Structure formats: structure tokens, C-alpha cells
Image: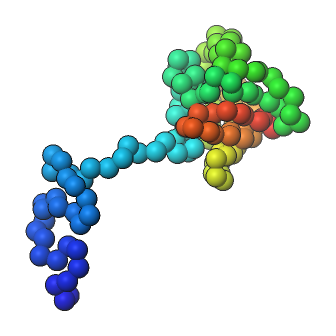
């Protein structure tokens, strides 16, 4: 090592970072961005715990759910809330298992296996989530 560079001569625990101001012993940084992965993963966890309030925090007010052919099955957050309120009431042990997840830009594609009751029949679905401003704005389902 030549002893040159932005960190030369610094000791472990020295929180000065070249080009950054520090406060409270650590670098000051902008708040972390919420990625499309984080949005869909949070929604998935809330779905499986049937926490309707948490589930809805991931949806935009004007979000839509649609079949893959484009037919809208729920238009707006209130319709999505009502649909899932009924689903959670009708199937209190409903669970989705994530088989695969692909992230392409602002879209997240999940391959899920869903069981309405433990040990019961399952069905598979692909859910294509479109994310904007850290909210789900559209979900297209392929069954």
C-alpha cells in the first residue's frame, strides 16, 4: 500500500468519510428508497398474515386488479379492500407460497401457489405487479 487515497491513515472507528458530513458518528445520507421488491414483499407478507390494514398500505388509491386479458376485476383501493376483506373472511387460513419472483424495472412478477385451507387443494397464479411511487398501481393475474 502506498498510504495514499481518501482513507489513508484512518483508524478503525474513525467515522470521517471523504466528501461526507457526519452527524452522531455516522455519515448523513438520504432516506433509503423503497424498491419494487420491498413493496411487493411487504404486500405478500401482509396478505399471508391477513392484515388488511397493512395490506392496503401498499396500494395506490387508484390501483386496479385485472385478469391477464385486461378485464378489470377491482378498480380503486376501496374495491380492492372490499374484495380482500371478503377473501380473508371466507378463507381465514388462506396462504400463498412464493415459488419464484422476477423483478424487471418497476414490475415484479410472482409465481405463487395458493391454498385456501391447510392441506387443501392448491392453485397456481402469476401476479404481475406494477409499482409507481412506492405503491402498487396495477396487478395483472394469470391463472
> What residue is at 18 percent from the left and 48 percent from the top?
23
Q: Is residue 70 left or right of residue 126?
A: right
Query: Quadrant location of the C terminus?
Result: top right
In the image, residue 97 lies at what x, y percent?
A: 62, 37
In the image, residue 64 lies at what x, y percent?
A: 73, 27
Q: Is residue 52 above or below residue 13?
A: above
Which quadrant would residue 83 be assigned to in this image? top right
Q: Is residue 109 left or right of residue 32?
A: right
Q: Is residue 27 left or right of residue 38?
A: left
Depth order, front residue of 137/119: 137
In the image, residue 53 lies at what x, y percent?
A: 53, 17
Residue 27 visible here: yes
Depth order, front residue of 115/20: 20
Total marks in image: 0
> What residue is at 75 percent from the left and 28 percent from the top?
65
* Colour scheme in use: rainbow
> What residue is at 22 percent from the left and 63 percent from the top?
17
Depth order, front residue of 130/102: 130
Q: Is residue 91 above or below residue 35?
A: above
Q: Is residue 74 above or below residue 16?
A: above
In the image, residue 38 lies at what x, y percent?
A: 51, 41
Which quadrant would residue 1 be assigned to in this image? bottom left
Residue 50 visible here: no
Amino acid at each position: 500500500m502506498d498510504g495514499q487515497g481518501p482513507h489513508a491513515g484512518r483508524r478503525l472507528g474513525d467515522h470521517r468519510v471523504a466528501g461526507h458530513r457526519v452527524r452522531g458518528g455516522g455519515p448523513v445520507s438520504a432516506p433509503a428508497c423503497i424498491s419494487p421488491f420491498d413493496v411487493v414483499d411487504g404486500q405478500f407478507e401482509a396478505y399471508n398474515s391477513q392484515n388488511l390494514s397493512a395490506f392496503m398500505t401498499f396500494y395506490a388509491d387508484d390501483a386496479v386488479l385485472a385478469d391477464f386479458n385486461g378485464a378489470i376485476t377491482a378498480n380503486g383501493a376501496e374495491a380492492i379492500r372490499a374484495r380482500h376483506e371478503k377473501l380473508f373472511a371466507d378463507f381465514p387460513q388462506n396462504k400463498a407460497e412464493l415459488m419464484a419472483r422476477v423483478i424487471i424495472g418497476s414490475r415484479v412478477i410472482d409465481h405463487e401457489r395458493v391454498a385456501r385451507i391447510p392441506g387443501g387443494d392448491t392453485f397456481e397464479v402469476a401476479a404481475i405487479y406494477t409499482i409507481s411511487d412506492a405503491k402498487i398501481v396495477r396487478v395483472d393475474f394469470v391463472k
